[in-house]
Image (cartoon, rainbow, N blue to C red):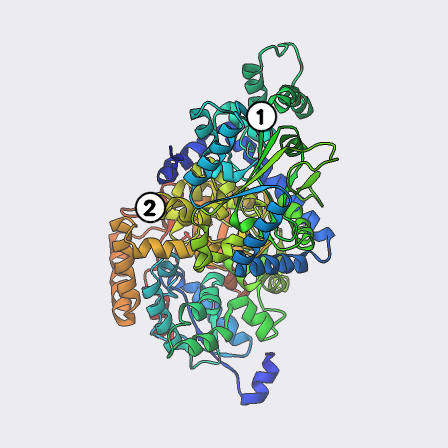
């Protein structure tokens, strides 16, 4: 099986998103809520900017010695009784998970939120193999019912309105009293909890992601606001952690620094409600915990990024601040990107994971406004990395011929000031003769501009010519 | 470097090369004249080198690094002899001062020259306020204006207080801040023609914020953004004029606004 990548249809996806009234209503929460909360949280902490530098330095250091930290993590995790599985590709990761499920004779697995699970298309794969995955994060649960991928890396159902959630629950939850009032978000939460409680207890395996893997202790860390991750990893007999190689950090101390910027950047909280460290399976005397712990560590193209210009992307701690502040994301939401990871971070990561051929729209669909970089807790230069992909796209002749030709023609002139002067002089004069207008509502070859706005008319005579004449 | 020091060192007014930008050159000459007037009012001499076309941003942001670098070399050669290079655009100024050094880093004969040019290249209002120490202008403008912070100027060059401080000295002018003045207008160079529907959604929000400010005039420091916003204002039939901030500061605010004739 392969993940469905709809990025080639980005323009069509975006047009649909712009016309989707429910989506547009839901997106206003991103634009207003997240930004304001992050701003307040950052302002309330005098050392926030210094912490961002520290966070960046921790990740840079780790990446520079990633081989050592991966080995150290493996040794510590094994010592604590966990089994570590390195997966080079998405298929390797899926097979590793399936083998564990088969051995445990698992029929149902509960799942905490994991973007790696999305990246490798795990749910579809498990279903194809007669294993029922049950998402337990409220947002993930909602989109699982709706049969959708997440539209945001930390708020997977941010595109869904409250009304739509209510409709979905009334459709999916047999035995839900039609008279029951679900008009408040809290009542929807209670309904989801009730439905999920049985699933938690029935699951054979719990699968979670990891926000961090700590080399010093062999622990994995998850942060959640619902506590679902804890129930997912503690109740079933087997716990599988899905992580990727860049989740490594050296020490507990480092994690505490990163946690201080993570929640503030993501939701504006000082800390997420639950921050859970788990180290190996249940030990003798432990009151709870799984009997088996497996940690699947995915590469899927990341090792190659480590050696090249995209290395800085591997600092990402998946807070979502870049998409929360992105005007393009605000306009169209996450699904239009069509490649698991969305917004600015997705525009950099998706081409590396899924191939530039399929995802070239994403790094192009940015105004380079730079707001993402300005809020990134680990200071990833996202516009620069998007430009990196545009350069690869240009080199590999993946751009439409007309666009490339137009650009080449313009550059040919721009590199020859004398000719440029002559050509623009003739062009402006021709336009003037063609009929002076103050602005154009439509013009041949300018449809992209004039579809939605008028084009202010060029001058009759260029500034340089006028300047020369005036002196 | 404050002007007094410059003057002290050389004994005369600094020589400024005005990089007009391709959009000012072709679409908005009066912005160029306004910029020249302001630079002279600040105590510098201004020249407009003929061997200028564009900063290369269209190539640079389209992934055509080779052409971008060739254009960058041309700009470096044409402007490196000046004491300062001043640009009436945050985005083109940032291309020269923040991106040329990286673009030409591997070119042994241009790397150091690109760095040197970057050091002395400024966005217009930053040059007037930060370099020349200008604190007021001799200009009057009746009515309320709102100011849009163009992204590159704001985030790459921290241009924010300079235009506002200078606008505060204009007789009769009131500044009515719009909501989200620091949010992108959706222009993004080729972005706005490549993804017109997405760009439109962004500029539509901007136009709503401009209208809510109740200002009669929209000012900004970049003609690209201004053409985008002016074009949308016009298409929606809004009665808000758009001008480059330099025109108002140079007391040229009574000339036709963008899209209203030249």
Disc number at residue A115?
A: none
Q: Which quarter of the figure is the C terminus of chain A placed in?
A: bottom left
Which numbered disc, 2 or 1, marks the residue closer to the eye?
A: 1
Looking at the image, which residue is at 35% across and 60% down?
A: B59
Looking at the image, which residue is at 69% across and 51% down?
A: A256
Circle nearer the N terminus (2, 1): 1
Dot 1 lies on which element?
A: loop
Q: Which is nearer the eye, B115 or A103?
A: A103
Q: Is residue A424 shown to the viewer in this render?
A: yes
> In the image, are marks 2 and 1 on the same chain?
yes
Q: Which is nearer the eye, B210 or B170?
A: B210
Chain for numbered disc 1: A
Quadrant assignment, res A378: bottom right
Looking at the image, which residue is at 61% across and 52% down?
A: A215
Chain for numbered disc 2: A
CA gap, disc 2 and disc 1: 39 Å
Residue at which label 2 appears: A357
**Number of dots carrying numbers:** 2
Dot 2 lies on which element?
A: helix
Residue A282 spot, x, y in % from top left? 68, 36
Residue A297 spot, x, y in % from top left? 51, 45
Residue at which label 1 appears: A204
Q: Is residue A440 shown to the viewer in this render?
A: no
Looking at the image, which residue is at 64% across and 48% down?
A: A262
Residue A72 spot, x, y in % from top left? 59, 54
Is residue B112 shown left or right of residue A442? right
């Amino acid at each position: 099986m392969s993940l469905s990548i709809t990025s080639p249809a980005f323009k069509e996806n975006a047009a649909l998103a712009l016309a989707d009234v429910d989506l547009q209503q839901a997106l206003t929460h991103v634009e207003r809520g997240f930004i304001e909360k992050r701003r307040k949280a950052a302002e309330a902490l005098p050392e926030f900017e210094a912490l961002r530098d520290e966070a960046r330095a921790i990740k840079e250091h780790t990446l520079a010695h990633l081989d050592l930290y991966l080995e150290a993590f493996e040794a510590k995790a094994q010592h604590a009784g966990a089994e570590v599985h390195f997966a080079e590709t998405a298929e390797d990761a899926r097979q590793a998970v399936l083998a564990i499920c088969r051995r445990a004779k698992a029929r149902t697995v509960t799942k905490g939120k994991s973007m790696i699970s999305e990246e490798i298309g795990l749910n579809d794969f498990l279903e194809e193999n007669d294993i029922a995955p049950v998402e337990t994060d409220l947002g993930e649960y909602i989109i699982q019912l709706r049969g959708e991928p997440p539209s945001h890396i930390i708020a997977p159902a941010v595109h869904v309105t409250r009304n739509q959630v209510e409709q979905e629950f009334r459709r999916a939850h047999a035995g839900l009293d039609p008279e029951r009032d679900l008009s408040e978000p809290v009542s929807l939460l209670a309904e989801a909890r009730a439905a999920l409680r049985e699933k938690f207890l029935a699951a054979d395996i719990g699968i979670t992601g990891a926000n961090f893997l700590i080399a010093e202790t062999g622990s994995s860390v998850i942060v959640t606001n619902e506590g679902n991750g804890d129930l997912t990893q503690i109740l079933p007999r087997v716990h599988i952690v899905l992580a990727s190689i860049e989740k490594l950090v050296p020490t507990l101390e480092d994690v505490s620094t990163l946690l201080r910027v993570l929640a503030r950047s993501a939701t504006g909280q000082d800390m997420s409600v639950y921050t859970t460290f788990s180290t190996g399976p249940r030990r003798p005397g432990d009151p709870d915990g799984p009997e088996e712990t497996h940690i699947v560590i995915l590469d899927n193209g990341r090792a190659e990024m480590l050696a090249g210009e995209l290395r800085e992307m591997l600092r990402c701690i998946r807070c979502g601040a870049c998409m929360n502040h992105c005007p393009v994301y605000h306009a169209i939401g996450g699904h239009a990107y069509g490649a698991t990871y969305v917004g600015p971070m997705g525009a950099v990561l998706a081409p590396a994971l899924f191939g530039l051929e399929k995802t070239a729209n994403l790094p192009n669909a940015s105004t380079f406004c730079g707001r993402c970089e300005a809020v990134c807790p680990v200071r990833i230069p996202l516009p620069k990395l998007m430009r990196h992909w545009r350069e690869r796209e240009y080199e590999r002749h993946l751009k439409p011929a007309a666009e490339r030709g137009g650009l080449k023609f313009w550059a040919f002139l721009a590199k020859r000031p004398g000719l440029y002067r002559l050509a623009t002089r003739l062009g402006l004069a021709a336009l003037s003769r063609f009929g002076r207008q103050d602005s154009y509502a439509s013009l041949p070859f300018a449809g992209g501009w004039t579809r939605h706005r008028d084009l202010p008319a060029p001058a009759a005579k260029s500034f340089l010519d006028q300047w020369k004449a005036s002196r | 470097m404050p002007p007094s020091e410059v003057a002290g060192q050389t004994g005369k007014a600094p020589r400024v090369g005005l990089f007009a930008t391709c959009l000012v050159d072709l679409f908005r000459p009066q912005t160029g004249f306004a910029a020249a007037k302001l630079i002279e009012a600040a105590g510098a001499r201004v020249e407009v080198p003929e061997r200028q076309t564009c900063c290369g941003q269209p190539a640079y942001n389209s992934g055509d690094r080779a052409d971008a670098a060739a254009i960058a070399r041309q700009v470096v050669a044409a402007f490196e002899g000046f004491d300062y290079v001043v640009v009436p655009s945050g985005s083109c100024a940032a291309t020269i001062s923040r991106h040329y050094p990286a673009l030409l880093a591997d070119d042994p004969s241009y790397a150091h020259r690109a760095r040197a040019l970057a050091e002395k290249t400024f966005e217009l209002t930053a040059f007037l306020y930060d370099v020349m120490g200008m604190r007021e202008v001799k200009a009057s403008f009746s009515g309320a204006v709102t100011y849009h912070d163009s992204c590159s100027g704001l985030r790459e060059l921290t241009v924010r207080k300079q235009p506002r401080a200078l606008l505060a000295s204009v007789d009769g002018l009131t500044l009515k801040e719009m909501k989200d003045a620091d949010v992108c207008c959706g222009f993004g160079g080729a972005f706005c023609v490549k993804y017109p529907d997405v760009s439109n959604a962004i500029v539509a929000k901007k136009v709503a914020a401009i209208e809510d400010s109740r200002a009669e005039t929209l000012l900004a420091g970049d003609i690209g953004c201004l053409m985008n916003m002016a074009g949308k204002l016009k298409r929606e039939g809004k009665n808000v004029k758009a001008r480059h901030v330099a025109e108002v500061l140079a007391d040229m605010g009574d000339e036709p606004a963008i899209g209203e004739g030249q």
